[in-house]
Every structure is written in C-alpha cells, then in structure tokens.
Amino acid sequence: MGTPRTLFDKIWSAHAIVEREDGSTLLHVDRHLIHDVAGVIIGELAERGLPVRRPDRTFAVPDHYAPTTGRAGPDPLSASPHAGHIRALEAGARETGMTLFALDDIRQGIVHVIGPEQGITQPGTVLVCGDSHTATHGALGALAFGIGASEIAHVLATQALWQKKPRTMRVTIDGALAPGVQSKDVILALIGKIGAAGGTGHVIEYAGSLIRSLSVEARLTICNMSIEAGARAGMISPDETTFAYLEGRPFAPKGEHWEAALAHWRRLPTDEGARFDRELTLDASSIAPMVTWGTSPEAALPITGRVPDPAEVADRERRTDMVHALEYMGLTPGTRLDAIAIDRVFIGSCTNSRIEDLRAAARVVDGRRSVVPAMVVPGSGLVKAQAEAEGLDRIFRDAGFEWRDAGCSMCVGMNGDLVASGERCASTSNRNFVGRQGRGARTHLVSPTMAAAAAVTGRLTDVRRLLQGGA
Amino acid sequence: MEPFRTLSAVAAPLPSANVDTDQIIPARFLWKARRDGFADTLFSDLRSGRDGGTFVLDRPEFAHARILVAERNFGCGSSREHAVWALWDGGIRAVVAPSFGDIFYNNALKNGLLPVVLPPERVAALLEILSARPGSIVTIDLAAQTVTGPDGHADRFEIDPLRKECLLEGLDDIDLTLRYRDRMEAFEREHDRRHPWL
Ligand code: SF4
C-alpha cells in the first residue's frame, strides 16, 4: 500500500485533468447543480455560441425565487415579480436537455436538499453549484463546493473547473450529544470556537465517534455550515450509514452498477495515518443548545449564557464589530439569552428543512401553541409530502404555524418571504448577517427544536426545559 | 474581460472587518440581470446613513474612488458574484485588505477586479493616511506586484501567476480552458468508463 491518503486527496487526484506548474488544477466535474439565480447564465452562454457540454451531468431546480404559497393555483408565478428567473431556468434546462425539477414537480425543493434526496449526490464525486452552501453535499463523501457566476458558465461550457488545491483540516468530534442537543448545535459550537474565518483556505473533514453515530440528515446540517466557518467545503468519509441512505434513491446506481459503485465507495474513506494540515477536536458531550446573538455566525453561545460585553474585549477591531452588532441586534450586554423576546420563527433552509428536522420540531410543538407568527418551509415537495403522511403538518397548523411549499424562502428572502425591519426572528437557517432576512431584520440562528421552543414561549428558550417531563 | 495593468486612483478607506457580501449588495437586488448594472445597489444598506453619517463613497472627496481599502475578511459570506459586479459597476477596480473571503477573492479575479492582500499593519497605516488626507492617490502596478501609498511607501503583494496573466491580458477563463480541449476529452472518456454508474 502507498502512503495513507485522505478522502479529499483521493477525490482530488481522481479528478485532476491538468495541473499547471503554478498549482492551478483543472478538475473534472461529475455533478453540476444549478438553480434559478443562475437561469440567465444558460442564455448568456448560448449568446456566446457555446453549447452546454454535459447536460447529462447537469441538474436544475428553482428554489431561491420559488413562491412558498399559492403554488396549487393555475399560474403560481402570476404574482411573482421574479417569475422571469424561474422561467429562464426551466426553459434553458429543457432546451439543453438537463434534468429539471420544475416548480410544479413534487421533487422540486432547495437544491442542497434534493441532491442527496434524489441520490444525485454520491460518494467520491466532485459536485459544484453556484451557491456557497454546496458544502452540504460533502456529508455523503463528495467533494462539493460553491462557485460563482462566471464559474457556472465555465462548468456549463467545459464540465471542468480551475481550482487551487485547498489545505485540509480534520475536526474530530467524539462522544455523545446530551438530550435536546442537535447537529446544528455542534456546528454552531465549532464556529463559535474557531471563528467565521477559522477554516479559511481549508476543506474540513468531520470525523470521530459522534459523526459516525449521526444520520446522513444530521451530517448534512454540519457540512452545510462549513462555509460559515470559512471553509471551502466540508466532508465526511462515507460508511454503511451513507450507503444505506443512498440505496434505492432515484439517481443512485442500480443492479450491477450498485455493486461496482459500492466497491469503489468503500475505498474512499480517509486511510488510517493520513495527514491533515490541521487537526482539531471537539467534545460532543460538552455541547449545549446554541444560539447566536450577533451578526456573524461566530457570535454563537450556549442558551444558558448572556449577551457578551464589548467592554471586556481587548482587541479594538473586535470591540467595534461587537458594538455594531449589538446595536443592530438591539441587545444590551449582560442580558440573559433566554430572556430575549422574539417576534417570529422560521423553520426551513438547506440547513434544517429535512424530514428529521421537521419531526424534531414537531415533537416540541405538539400540544402547544405558537405565540408569535411562525412558519415551516419544507426543503422539498417530497419532504412536505412525507411530513403530511406522518401528520406533522397537522401538529404545526394546530399550533398556529404556517405550512408552506418548498424553497429557500426566509433564509434569504429573495422570493419576498421577509422579516420586517427591527423584527427579531429565531431561524433555523445558516446566516445572521446584517440584512440577510430583510433590511433591519434581526436573526438568531438556532436548531429546529430550539426554534420550536422559541415559537411556543415567545422568547429564546432552552429547549431542554420543555423536553423535561414531556418527550 | 477588461485587462488590468496599472491603476493610479483615489482610494477610499473602509475601516471595518468582515464586510460581507450581503453588505456589499443585499440579496434583494440579486434578481437584476448582469447587463442592467448594479452601481446603485452597492453598499445599499450602509448608504442610508446607519450611524447618522455619510458613507465613505458618498463623500465628494471619494466620488472618483477606484480603490477600496478595508480590514480583514473582506467579501466573506454568500458566494454571490454580484458583490464583485456591484463594486465593478460602482467604479471600484481593486480592493486592498489583510484577507478576503475565499470565494469573493476568486470571483474578483475572474471579473478583472484585483484583490490585494497586504499585511494588517500596512493596511492599518494606509487606512490612517487615507482618512487623514481624503482623496489621496494610491498606485497599483500589477506587473510589478506593488502597491504604492500616498506616502510613497511601496509594498509588494502576491498573486497567482495564472491569474496575473489572465488579468494582464484580459483573458477570460473559458478561453483559457478550451486550449486544453484534447486532454479534457481524453480524461472524460476514461473517467466515464471507470465510473459507469455516474
Ligand atoms: S436555503 Fe438559504 S442558504 Fe440554502 S441555498 Fe437557499 S438561500 Fe442558500
């Protein structure tokens, strides 16, 4: 056997077409996912006289501009100011022969939810999409990263991409999670620890006994927010959990191809003794339910904490940032985090809109009522249908939640689902930046159960208190 | 793509860290097409005068700024290329900072906008001079890889040679890659044969 290699190294070297002396590598792309923001690019490429090189490797779905209400009507886009983007994507995909999950297709949903759900995302592949949360797909053992608009055009035209080899970092998380703690808390705790630029220039592989014990859905949540830690991508070595998840999915290999793929996938995990440029560890049992108080995901603290005081920060630049963040968030230092009243709750986004997320939130909501406006936006039409088959929609509706159609929705507000200026929202999404959910909107990032707890109490709440005695 | 060679222009100081792409262009403007232009949406939420003051690019001394100098982690956050387009359409051709968000950095290069990494203490010094003497000129020479401040102090910066070549010649990425067409096709045939399930 040669030198031990990481999952990342194996995928990278199997996809390198050209390596220039300066370190730029032309990487072959196995899976290219595109969404409605990129719809116009297909047309722009055609204007330059360039064909789509591999429509059979390209998958299109509208999500960012997708309306989340009124979809059952005859023309769901009639009221949408952004209908043009969705139509451009759908028309471009049809003309070029890509696989399309159109707005009226039950398989439509957030691009990072449907890739794994359909079995399009597979171990050992290079997968790209014009969206930074493409890191999500790494949970299945793919090398998946976000690209910009000119790179989308480049991949459409060439099915390849120029990349500089990133550094590698392994985050080993051992131990078990305490009751009421979810994988969202794990990634928020990690970002809180290493900072929003802590992973810059690196691809993170998550390892350790906790990761091994997690479902694929929980792993997707962790990889999803790798980008919030500054990393280029997040990945997890594929294992039996991964294979069981993929088997039988529509785009997963079938029959003898399944056997061949499986044999290939089993050789992918990071070898014992492989070297990473950086190693970090985290103790799972020490993680509490987390919440962000500021305007960067690194502003994450256990719900048992208090709003921090800039006066206690020595670094001038950090202190100024903190003062601005607190001013924007309308918070006073020293306030208990669980005393912060909220105005609205959003359960959705590619971080936390899969069926397990909805089940976990519904368990907290069941038999209670939301005291603030709240909505659930399932990650795909299939997640929605599954939730309805399990009666989760009834639990949410009975508690006063809105039950919407699939899309990005209030994660980014591009379809018009916005948080009003000055409003405070407990959100299961991934970004709490200034203006992210709407101008002047104040976002607190939380797990699905913590969002549910916030809805039924009207303030940020330690979900463990609601779970005691109950479920 | 417009080539980038040397640039002598007014530099505007933006003494904030973590200026993310949502600040550079809020998501609600992303629906516009590239050709519509994004100049009017650049830093839209900051321009409303959050602190009661005037945003730096709205001050008359900086009306012709072509260079922006900011603190660490400029362009972090969402991968939207619109952030680069908004800066470009707003007249900015180079950003100097101690560090950048990865994706922003790459997007900038692909669009002819030069991101320059200088050590934090040099950025701090530049910020001080630019704030004390608003409207002063900074010169960036890409071929020589230098930034010269209003004080005459020149700093060298690093840039990937391939990127440098593309910027100097105004070559777009697709033009460059299609030079490798034969190798790409051969690779693909072999790759597809070995992974028939894809
Ligand atoms: S849900 Fe949010 S983070 Fe995910 S793809 Fe949509 S806009 Fe991006």
Image (spheres, coloured by chain):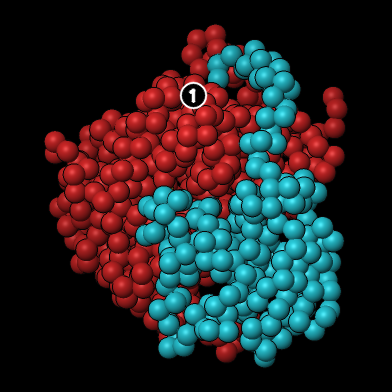
Chain colours: A red, B cyan
Question: Residue beneath label 1, please?
Answer: A55
Question: What amino acid is labelled 1 in the image?
Answer: Pro
Number of numbered labels in the structure image:
1
A119 shown above or below A85: above
B121 shown above or below B23: below
Q: Give the camera-side residue of A196 and A273.
A: A196
Kindly indicate the quadrant of the structure image that contains residue A128: top right
On screen, residue A466 versus residue A192, left or right, reads: left
Q: Is residue A283 visible?
A: no
Q: Is residue A439 visible?
A: yes
Q: Chain of mark 1?
A: A
The quarter in which the N terminus of chain A is drawn is: top right
Q: Give the camera-side residue of B25 and A323.
A: B25
Identify the residue at image location x=43%, y=88%: B52
A395 shown above or below A254: below
On screen, residue A94 versus residue B139, left or right, reads: left
- Secondary structure under tag 1 reads helix
Identify the residue at image location x=22%, y=38%: A388
x then y, percent, for residue B3 = 69, 53
x then y, percent, for residue A80 = 24, 49
x then y, percent, for residue A367 = 19, 55
